[in-house]
Image (cartoon, rainbow, N blue to C red):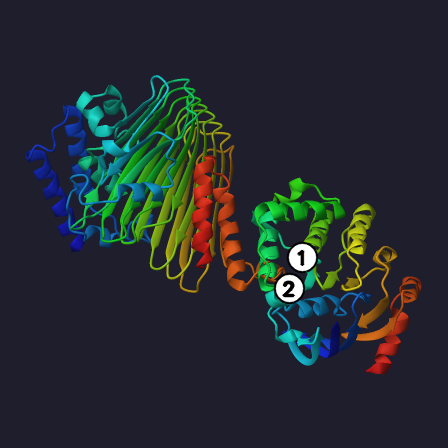
Amino acid sequence: MLDIRGLRAKAGNKEILRGIDLHVGAGEVHAIMGPNGSGKSTLAHVLSGRENYEVTGGEVIYRGEDLLAMSPEMRAREGIFLAFQYPVEIPGVSTTYFLKAAVNAVRKHKGLEELDAMEFLALIKEKLKLVEMDQVLINRPLNEGFSGGEKKRNEILQMAVLDPVLALLDETDSGLDIDALRVVAGGVNALRRPDRAMIVITHYQRLLNYIVPDFIHVLFEGRIIKSGTKELALELESRGYDWLKGGAAAVQ
Amino acid sequence: MIATESKERYIAAFEQSQSNGNGAAPAWLKKLRRDGIASFAAQGFPTPKDEEWKYTSVEPIASLPLAQSQGSERGIDADEMIAQSFADATCPRLVFINGVWTREFSFAPGLPRGVRLTSLAELIKQDEPLLSEQLGRHANYRRQAFVALNTAFMGDGAVVIIPPGCCLAQPIYLIYISSPGAGPLVSHPRTLIFLGAGSEAKIIESYVGVDEGAYFCNAVTELIGAADSLADYYRLQREGRSAFHTGTFDADLDRGAHLTAHAVTLGGSLIRNNVHVALNGEGAECVLNGLYLGEGKQHIDNFTEIDHLKPRATSFELYKGILNGAAHGVFNGKIVVHKDAQKSDARQVNKNLLLSANAVVNTKPQLEIYADDVKCSHGSTIGQLDADALFYLRTRGLGVAEARSLLSFAFAGDVVGRIKVDSLRRQLDDYLAVQFRRV
């Protein structure tokens, strides 16, 4: 589904991704871990098309297409979804209004009829249950005054409604207490499907107790220095990242 | 000097109107008009040298040939204009064409006893005592040239009187239509709104006009809120594309009176809105909400001034502007807390969104505080669309144009959301949605 080959990217003059190789197949959940500043979030944003980063090398093939040639909105319409670490607050627009516009932009792209207000309401009501969210919240301005947990639930709600092919979850666990984490992870797990892939970016092993990945990759200084299965997370939990950093130096 | 020539023309036109019988009026009004023209003669047109007109040149207004309106000029599509005014067909209304009351489009069914909704010209004929008591007492013609001109030439407009204790559920619409017809035209509509003690009303003043041809609408409204009255006042400006509009709104609030005054500026080419509120009684409250949208070469100047004259009065002001093309926006927010106005609470916010590199905004908060126990704050921002928000929307599948439009709509949303008249808010939402699709 997704093939990242030798991906390099910089922000300003600083090279952040320094040759990433990653293959993600349909139905797989990959976790990307690593210390702060290793390039985890940059990878998510580069895959979503953020313009602040300049891709300086490599390629990304998504379902046979050159992903890097697509605009952010085209990637979204083609099924890529980024759950933000820091969801943006937009006063003046309700989640409902915004999400209906988004759903219909995607449907239009797929040649489907746009949903009317009633159809959309039916769709969103069903998805609200998934993240245990009150309908009152989605009639309020998008993310404005939401708690950290509410914002993250809102991200997963959007993911559920937009029905992506490939979901990128950027530090979805950050700032969540254990109850909120359980709800958010429960929502994500319910969305796992054989035809949908996920890349879960996290700093902490904690999230992976709830969202159990098929593969784990450790990112350090812009490269994947170690890949493994879910057992790797436990090893990282007990040993930290330092034992791997020596290996990274050797790779350099 | 265009301004001097123009001043002379206005003075000559005044003398002519007095001698040819158009000036027939009770003695007090004749005197008021005389005072008006004398004040105008003394002041002349303002120039950018005046601090309060620093960013706005009225030369295009001064140089417009003078033709006083005689009422409905030419085949004007009044129904279309009324639709543009965001009116609600079920609500009582007065309609004016070129400043003159037009009976056939006006109606006021089932108003509660004692409520008066009448043309000013009709009330002048009846020599209603409230007029001589209140007209010209609030809008200061001695200090403001355009108020002076309006005072000199005032002949018609709307009068709304709400008796004490009356709560009027239905909003009242005052619709001023301008259509220059064969040549340019000048009109000076005058509105007087009086809310008796403990009364409550919603009043919508809407200014619309045809796009073809230049004209000048110089409107003045005085609102008096007696003790504990509650006014929800709207001033919508959707003049024609080539129009000049100077609008003055002057409110005087007594003890415990509350006023929310919304100003929505959409049309016209050169616009100056003057809003002045005198918090003239203990515990009086005013909320000013403003939204101005400029595109092309529109020039929109909002000057607001709030006088805290008595203790424990509060004012809250939020003005937002969205400027595209080469539009120029000006906001000047003056708050004066006078010596006796202890425990005043005044907050002011002005936010501007620039959608193009050529759009310009000047914003100037001005606080003068002469009391020592007060809470005052102000803040202004000028910015572009938030890049993070744009990216966020695009990652959800919205195209760049759609995302920009949604964010502009959202920016206007917290002002529009404060509009309490449902039909008006919905119409404005629809209008903005269409406008921003072109952003």
Task: State the mark number for residue A162.
Answer: 1
Image quadrant containing the C terminus of chain B: bottom left
Residue at left offset 62%, top offset 75%: A69
Q: Is residue B254 above or below residue A4?
A: above
Q: Can you say whether A14 is above or below B292 in the image?
A: below
Compare residues B338 and B25 and report the one nearer the observer. B25
Q: Chain of mark 1?
A: A
**Residue at the outermost left position:** B19
Query: In this rendering, is residue B300 above or below A136?
Result: below
Q: Where's the N terminus of chain B, which quadrant? A: bottom left
Q: Amino acid at mark 1?
A: Leu
What is the crowding at mark 2: few (fewer than 14 residues within 10 Å), some, or many (at least 20)?
A: many
* Chain identity of mark 2: A
Apparent side of residue B210 relative to residue A22 in the rendered image (left or right): left
Badge 1: how crowded within 10 Å, few (<14), some, or many (20+)?
many
Residue A131 visible? The answer is no
Residue B389 rendering spot, x and y as whole percentages: 59, 58
Mark 1 in CB contact with mark 2 (< 8 angstroms): yes
Res B428 seen here: yes
Residue labelled with disc 2: A76
Q: Give coordinates of residue B26: x percent, y percent.
A: 15, 24
The secondary element bearing badge 1 is classed as: helix
Q: Amino acid at mark 2?
A: Ala
Which quadrant of the view contains residue A247?
bottom right
